[in-house]
Amino acid sequence: MGETILRVLMRTAALVVPVVLSAQPAPGGDATKGKDLFLKYSCYACHGFSGQNGPGARLVPMKMTAAGFVAYVRLPRTRQMPSFSAKVLSDEQLTDIHAYIKTLPESRPAKDIPALNQFKEQ
Amino acid sequence: MAKSPKNSVGRRGFLKHAAAGAAALAATPGLGTAQQAAPPPRGAPGPSGAQLAREAGVARPAATALVEHPGSDFMVDVLRALGLEYVAANPGSTFESLHESIINYGDNKMPEFLTCTHEESAVALCHGYAKIEGKPMMALIHGDIGLQHASMAIYNAYVDRVPVYMVVGNHVDGAERTSGVQSMHSGNDLGALVRDYTKWDDQPYSLGAFAESAVRAYKIATAPPRGPVLLVAHHEVQSHAMTGPAPRIPKLVMTAPPAGDSAAVAEAAGLLVNAERPLIVGERAVRSAEGLQLMVDLAETLQAPFNSQERMNFPTHHPLSGNGGTGYQPDVMLGLEVADLSNQTRAAHARGAKVIAISAMGLALKSNLQEFGHYAEVDLDIGADAEATLPYLIEACKKLITADRRRLIDERGRKLAEAHRQVRLANVEAAAYGWDSSPVSLARIAGELWPLVKDEDWSFVSPQAFAGNWPNRLWKMDKPYQYIGGQGAGGMGYGAPASVGAALANRKYGRLSINIQTDGDLNYAPGVLWTAAHHRIPLLSIMHNNRGYHQEVMFIEQMCSVHNRGADRAHIGTKLWDPNIDYTLMAKAYGLYAEGPISDPQQLAPALKRAIERVKNGEPALVDVVTQPR
Ligand SMILES: Cc1ncc(C[n+]2csc(CCOP(=O)(O)OP(=O)(O)O)c2C)c(N)n1
Ligand SMILES: [Mg+2]
């Protein structure tokens, strides 16, 4: 059992997602710490390791400000999204998560993906 | 004449045929004395040495008499008369006589024996087969223990209104069965174990009664609302010799499904034709290719959107497919074989809309398990099979549509076609999200698969809700067998065996069967992979390996939040990692061609191509893909 849960998660998430964490630190948050928290607190479960797959809202590109993000996570507007109180994740930690999400790469648009164009033509 | 307990007659009178046969055998020099030499115990004495040896798998008691024409030979004739192509089973001595008759007397044809490694797999395999073939195949089940193993799969088929033909072995006569396993595996009323979720069961005590019950069981299973049926084949009836002419096998006369009352159908037509924004919702509506065409005819007659749920009820690329787009607030909704309309009805009434239900489900409900959901206050409830009712409803609608109404209806159709196009384009845009990410996105799996299968006669055989419904959202589907829906009762462990069963049915049509296989589901009873390999059942399985019971991860995360505790331990009890399960090794161990794990989306298409080649050559293949959670 030697491996910590975080390391298992990191290994999964680190596979290909081309994130250069320290290169572009988002103002106000530490993206490296944010990545740990994103995985540890199961954000990936509904939003995907990509931040844009699954039943949760698409987080990439992240359009909220850090403050807006913190406020939203405290009091989500949908019942599907669990709220995270300050007891569970501090403002600072949520700001770190926000910074990490900002580093996640946006997808190519469908028109640039040949395999998807076939579906438009059907 | 000395009579062995095997010859005992009169006990409930069910061994008439056998008695005379056994008497004849007893008169044969040598055999009769053997029977006398080792009478099985009556009452409840402790097990004999021979029994203990048998239970330990060592030997059969030496005293077994020859039986030239066992009742089970006749049972095979009955099963063959019903056209049961296959029998899926995990072996067990309660049906040993029937097993032997199937493989030798019946030459293992019609039905052909399929070896299953779990009774749940056997029944789920039948479930998948029936969804493709439209008729049942048989599961042969070992006594009370096999039936308990099978039970969840039976419940899934019951809720899914799918016919499954089950026969369970039993030692009914306490005087004949030994102590130990034969007693432990037998019951007075085996049907009771699963009666809450079988449509019908019976335990015939003679071959004549077996024939009658067997035909009746088939008829009941296949008459809408369809469902699993269970016959108890007593060991005594199977194994005793037949004497005299075989009983008659009654002719199978299928029951025509119930169609809606004409006044109610006319009322429904009036509501639908005069609606401004009608909506049709179909859940378990389509039973056949003709049924699918009827759905299209109805939607086109009304120019109403058709929201297909659960399985293939409507062509995905038809301009009327969907729910009308944003802002389309239906004023009349028609539910076709929808299990629970309570939520939609509440919402409809809140905005002054009306709801019509056509469903045969309510015609045969059981009390205990609550699968029927909530009571829906629908405005018009037609207790009839939807597919059988549609010709009348379409005709009634056509009669009511005036030229003026036709113009309005056609105008609505043009708007709906545009709304449908927008939804399709939005789906393609959404498929791009995370396209290049690793682990692999579910949309990418569907997107990479399509060009490889679209020119084949393909059949998507697994549930897809946990795969983001991407095949439905992207692929052009216009045949009922192209998507056969979910578990029925949401019982996991259905996906793998039902896919194998569906692929078995697809095999004779040369269809390419495709299964997106979730990891949790496979791990309930992965031995069904071996069944696919052993019986050369071509099936492409693509692992949706999110390394966990992801649905439950999300539920536990919600609970953490509700209890105001962090979700950092939500993985406990919900994840399948540490160690990761190697599905390539697993599949290879069961004899399949397998590749993976694939985490890099670039490697996906070539691997799928190689696996599809194998499948097209007639074997099952598996590609393990490490995926985004959903
Ligand atoms: C027999 C049974 N046991 C437990 C459950 C609860 N359950 C619902 S979804 C699910 C997870 C299944 O995991 P998997 O098949 O890998 O799908 P995923 O959620 O990961 O997409 C479980 C365990 C169930 N529905 N059926
Ligand atoms: Mg899973």
Image (cartoon, grey):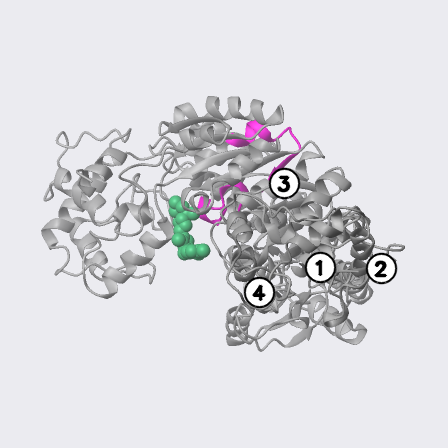
Between label 4 and label 1, give the one nearer the viewer: 1
Q: Nearer the viewer, residue B354 or B601?
A: B601
Quadrant in which residue A112 is drawn: top left
Name the residue located 63 percent from the left edge and 40 percent from the top edge: B114
In percent of width and height, residue B504 lies at: 64, 38
First along the sequence among labels 3 and 2: 3
Give the numbered dot on residue B253: 2
Which mark sits nearer the N-terminus, 1 or 3?
1
The boundaries of the magenta stretch are B449-471
Q: Is residue B172 above or below residue B162?
A: below
Residue A43 position, x and y percent, is: 26, 48
Q: Nearer the viewer, mark 1 or mark 3?
A: 1
The secondary element bearing badge 2 is classed as loop
Amino acid at circle 1: Ser
Mark nearer the N terminus (4 vs 1): 1
Does B41 appear above or below B477?
below
Q: Is residue B136 magenta?
A: no
Q: Residue at x 11, y 43 (%)?
A: A29
Residue of label 3: B114
For marks 2 and 1, the one nearer the N-term is 1
Report how far apart the C-alphas of labels 2 and 1 lie in the structure: 41 Å
Tell me the distance, in whole angstroms, between the alpha carbons under discs 2 and 4.
26 Å
Q: Quadrant of residue B488?
A: bottom right
Q: Could you tell me if the residues under marks 4 and 1 are in contact, i.e. CB atoms within 8 Å?
A: no
**Secondary structure category for the residue under label 3:** strand
Query: What secondary structure is found at the residue carrying circle 4?
Result: helix
